Image (tube, rainbow, N blue to C red):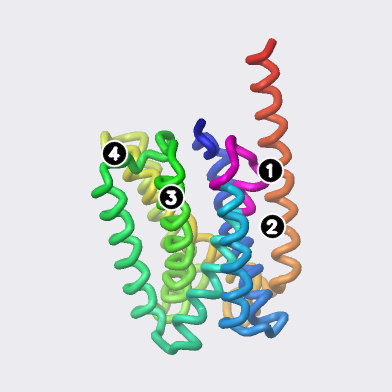
Amino acid sequence: MNKLPKITLSFWIMKIAATTLGETAGDMFSMTLNIGYVVSSVLLFAGFLVSVVLQIRSKSYIPPLYWLVIVATSTSGTTISDMMDRTWELGYPAGSAILLSLLGAIFLYWRSTGESLNVDEIRSSRVEFLYWTTILVSNTLGTALGDFLADSSGLGFAGGALLIAGLLATVIAAYYTTSLSRVFLFWAAFVLTRPFGAQFGDVLTKSQEKGGLDLGTMGSSAVLGGILVVMVIYTMVQQRRATDDLVG
């Protein structure tokens, strides 16, 4: 049985909310609470491991668990990226290049196994493990790429968000107007929503002097968490109705 959600508009809304929450919550742990990048990365990655093991061991799609893992990949990805770029002083360009190369290598390995990259065809624990590894790396890359666009490219937080939004719009247009592979377009959109979330999270939390709205990491995380919880409850209600219709 497929344990992943159907790809609908609500999925993409929840994905953006979850990845933006990952950015604000990751910054809350490492900076607002002053835990630091290394300790935050260890704690949040441990949380990811626990949640992903539960997800892989589950027998069906459980919305709260699935989206908990997505948030865990985003929060741990945020602090891991910041640790690479700031604590290890690799810098945003180098950090982004390393993570992009790693993501490409994972896709190549996945393809070499003979398994489909279509998320509607994930049926085994091995492929699901590759799926979650891809998401963790792509969410880590999203933070590095978002920081690169905001700080190193000269675009700023708002400019970087607009650029990523433009790329997402291009992917959406390609979906409706071209015959490009739907699997390729899905993963392109999936990867791009993470730097968009990183940019949007920075717009929410950073000071007005830096081009942000100065809402803070805690306030922004609370709002985004509330939105995600409401959407998860909505998904569960829809899932229950679909099950009742089948039984009826």
For the residue marked with disc 3, what is the amino acid?
A: Tyr
Residue 5: image x %, image y %? 54, 38
Q: CA distance from mark 4 to mark 1?
A: 29 Å
Whether residue 135 can be seen here:
yes
Q: Which residue is mark 1?
A: 231
- Closer to the observer: label 1 or label 3? 3
Separation of marks 4 and 3 at Cα, in angstroms:
18 Å
Marks 4 and 2, the one that precedes in the sequence: 4
Q: Which is more toward the observer, 132 or 12?
A: 132
Instruction: Using the image, determine if residue 9 lies above or below residue 90.
Output: above
Q: Quadrant of residue 144?
A: bottom left
Residue plotted at (36% across, 48% down): 170
Q: Give the secondary structure at mark 1.
A: helix
> Alpha carbon of mark 3 to alpha carbon of mark 2: how far?
24 Å
Give whichever of discs 3 and 2 has the lower sequence position: 3
Look at the numbered disc 4 and give the secondary structure of its residue: loop
Q: Which residue is mark 2?
A: 224
Residue at 42% in and 70% down: 145
Which mark, residue 131?
A: 3
Of residue 194 and residue 73, the one placed in the foreground of this image is 73
Residue 33 at x, y = what percent? 72, 81
